[in-house]
């Protein structure tokens, strides 16, 4: 998340930034990247964090079941 915040601050300061995506061959400019960062922070980061918590819960839950149930 810090990287996205740094990018937003660099764009706000007026410095030119662009990123080349070698896979798709597209080039994203600073303002476009800042908009993507906003969407990433608001939506995707929250979803990924929730998914990670669910994964951790499942891991602990099934480890507890393995200890409790005879194999």
Image (tube, rainbow, N blue to C red):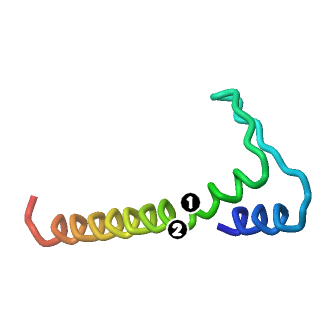
Q: How many residues crowd around disc 1 within 10 Å: few (fewer than 14), some, or many (20 or more)?
A: some
Q: Secondary structure at mark 1?
A: helix
Q: Is residue 25 left or right of residue 39?
A: right
> What is the quadrant of residue 12 in the picture?
bottom right
Residue nearest the observer in this picture, 22 or 65:
22
Inter-mark Cα distance, 2 to 1 = 6 Å
Quarter in which the N terminus is drawn: bottom right
Which residue is painted at 42% across and 63% down in the image? 47
Q: Secondary structure at mark 2?
A: helix
Which residue is painted at 70% across and 59% down in the image? 34
**Residue 67 sits above or below residue 34 on the image:** below
Residue nearest the observer in this picture, 55 or 65:
55
Quarter in which the C terminus is drawn: bottom left
Mark 2 touching mark 1, by CB under 8 A?
A: yes
Measured from the top left, where is residue 9 in percent x and y? 81, 69
According to the picture, the residue beneath numbered tag 2 turns out to be: 42
Q: Is residue 13 left or right of residue 37?
A: right
Measured from the top left, where is residue 24 in percent x and y? 63, 28
Question: Which numbered dot is residue 8?
Answer: none
> What is the quadrant of residue 53 in the picture?
bottom left
Residue nearest the observer in this picture, 55 or 71:
55
Which residue is painted at 89% across and 52% down in the image? 16
Q: Is residue 68 left or right of residue 60?
A: left
Q: How many marks?
A: 2
Q: How many residues crowd around disc 2 within 10 Å: few (fewer than 14), some, or many (20 or more)?
A: few
Measured from the top left, where is residue 3 in percent x and y? 72, 63
Which residue is painted at 84% across and 63% down in the image? 10
Question: Which numbered dot is residue 40?
Answer: 1
Measured from the top left, where is residue 15 in percent x and y? 91, 58
């Amino acid at each position: 998340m810090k990287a996205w915040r740094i990018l937003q601050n660099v764009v706000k300061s007026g410095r030119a930034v662009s990123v080349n995506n070698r896979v798709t061959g597209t080039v994203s400019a600073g303002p476009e990247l800042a908009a993507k960062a906003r969407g990433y922070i608001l939506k995707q980061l929250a979803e990924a964090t929730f998914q990670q918590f669910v994964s951790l819960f499942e891991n602990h839950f099934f480890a507890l079941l393995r200890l409790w149930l005879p194999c």
